[in-house]
Image (tube, helix red, strand yellow):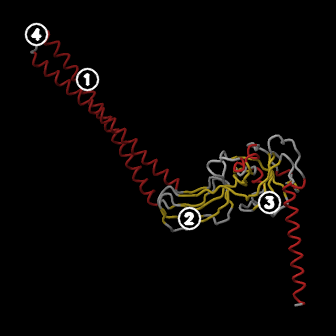
Amino acid sequence: MKSLRPLVVGALILAALAAAGWSWWQASISSLPLGLASGNGRLEAEEIDIATTIAGRVAQVQVEEGALVQQGQVLAVIDTADLAAQLTRAEAEAKGTEAQVDQVQALISQRQAERAYAAQEHDRAQELTQRGVQSQSVSDAKKAALDTAEATLASALAQLDTAKRSVEAAYALVGQYKTQIADATLTSPVLGRVLYRLAQPGEILAAGGKVLTVLDLSQVYMEIFLPADQAAATAIGAEARIRIDSIDYAIPAYVSFVAPEAQFTPKQVETASEREKLMFRVKVRLPEELVQAYIDQVKTGVRGEAFIKLSGAEDMAWPAQFVGQPIPAAALPGN
């Protein structure tokens, strides 16, 4: 029993210290100066699914989970052997339709010459008939020949229009295959970090199949919830600070979003006591320049607290007990 006494005493001392620390922290939070609001949250970033727009076999996945990727960096490649063969065939067919256009244009030239000759013959026959040198039947025959020549010319012109449309359709198909081949190379749309690797080389995916999930590190933020009175005094763009549990830095931030509707409340709020329970979601975002300056250290999911300057307190200095040590000036936006 005597041997357990020091352990029990030590445990009681640790519990007392923990309780004292918690009480001090709660007191410091509750003693926020007028004009400041705060809330707990965690750093988050938007998740982007990197998916294939075409069905096919995964040829390469060039990044691992946790890798930092740049905007435009190649992440994965889908096999395009079948598409390449279809593109070759489509290009050959497109050239064939162009040859048809040339043939129809040559036919039109022939039909135009025939129509011009028929028109001359018709005019000559009309003149001879009027002079009584030639019978009306001959003139009628020349008129029928002219009508036939004009009809064949119109038909040839219609064939040309059809042939040109065929060329357009053929090259549209060529463009479609080229686009699909280009889409087979999956690139990162943002500066981010690979969160999940969802497919491996050799797997066959349907169109829309997910290969990777990337965190968009240009959109790092903390979500907190504020009561209605503080949310009403929170402006978009308001100055803010974020303190992460694991570091003693005050991270510059700003308010990027205030929810227009309350959460955690009944649909209809009838009494003043119920209205006091209204909580509004607020996003406090880190400046993109700051994130890029510390890109290797940025981790989502870490917990902390955000402090916001409310309307009317824009010129108030930040209390030292809440901001801690400042981020080096070189990392701040604009430097």
- The picture quadrant where one finds residue 324 is bottom right
Q: Is residue 65 above or below residue 107?
A: below
Q: As shown in the figure, which amino acid type bears the numbered disc 1? A: Ala
Classify mark 1: residues with Cα within 10 Å, few (<14), some (14-19) or many (20+): some
* Local SS, label 1: helix
Instruction: Name the N-terminal-most of marks 2 and 1.
Output: 2
Residue 250 in percent (x, y) is at 84, 55
Q: Secondary structure at mark 4?
A: loop
Secondary structure at badge 2 equals: strand
Earlier along the polypeptide chain: callout 2 or callout 4? 2
What's the CA distance linking mark 1 and mark 3?
89 Å
76 relative position to 314: left or right: left
Label 3 amino acid? Ile
Vertical placement of residue 110 versus 213, above or below: above
Q: Position of residue 287 (x, y in %)?
A: 75, 49
Please report contact status of discs 1 and 3: CB closer than 8 Å, yes or no: no
Label for residue 132? 4
Specify whether 99 is left or right of 80: left
Report the residue marked by disc 1.
116
Could you tell which of marks 3 and 2 lies nearer the N-terminus?
Answer: 2
Residue at numbered disc 2: 60
Kindly report which numbered mark, 4 or 3, lies closer to the viewer in this rendering: 3
